Amino acid sequence: MAAGGGENPRRRPYSGMPSAFRELLVYRQAVDLAHELHGTVEHWPLPDRKAIEPQLIRAATSVGANIAEATGRWHEKDRRQLLLVARGSLYETEHWIAYCEQRGLIARNTASRTDEINRLLNGLIKRRPPS
């Protein structure tokens, strides 16, 4: 271990450049939806927070996380697989939102917000990398 706090002096410092995934509209919309849902569940009755909140928030945050991870993959097969996982998490999020709409926990038509995210995500899945 190097002296001075355990830092490796040969390692380059972080350049400060944002990762590519932060520029993707689909990523930004997925993260915005997850943040909005997180703020909404804070006001739910305790039984609903305990039963539904963990699954809804896990699914919603997983969408953006898998999109981010996919952009860091070198191999197309790995990238595509992570985008498919993100799409599965989006469908799960849509399920939980629709369920919560029926229970009166979330405003009606909130589930429709997943439609645009799904369209953009499918575009990423179908897109071929540059040769």
Image (spheres, helix red, strand yellow):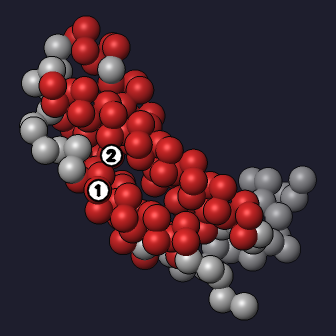
Residue 59, position as x, y percentages in the image: 44, 37
Which residue shows up at 13% across the image and 44% down it?
Answer: 109
Q: Helix, strand, or loop for circle 1?
A: helix
Q: Which of 45 and 56 is in front in this view?
A: 56
Residue 65, position as x, y percentages in the image: 52, 52
> Which residue is situated farthest in the bottom direction here?
131
Q: What residue type is labelled 2?
A: Ala
Residue 108, position as x, y percentages in the image: 10, 38
Which residue shows up at 32% across the image and 46% down it?
Answer: 34
Find residue 57 and report its image quarter.
top left
Q: Which of 13 and 114 is in front in this view?
A: 114
Is residue 106 shown left or right of residue 25?
left
Q: Is residue 16 visible?
A: no
Q: Distance between the residues labelled 2 and 1?
A: 14 Å
Give the foreground label among 2 and 1: 1
Which residue shows up at 33% across the image and 13% down it?
Answer: 50
Find residue 28 and report its image quarter.
bottom left
Is residue 85 shown left or right of residue 117?
right
Find residue 53 and report its image quarter.
top left
Q: Do the residues labelled 2 and 1 touch (CB within 8 Å)?
A: no
Q: Helix, strand, or loop for circle 2?
A: helix
Q: Which amino acid does label 1 sit on?
A: Asp
As drawn, the label of residue 115 is 1
Does 112 sit above or below residue 92? below
Which circle's residue, 2 or 1, is located before the other in the chain?
2
Q: Can residue 1 be seen in this view?
A: yes
As drawn, the label of residue 34 is 2
Which residue shows up at 64% across the image and 73% down it?
Answer: 14
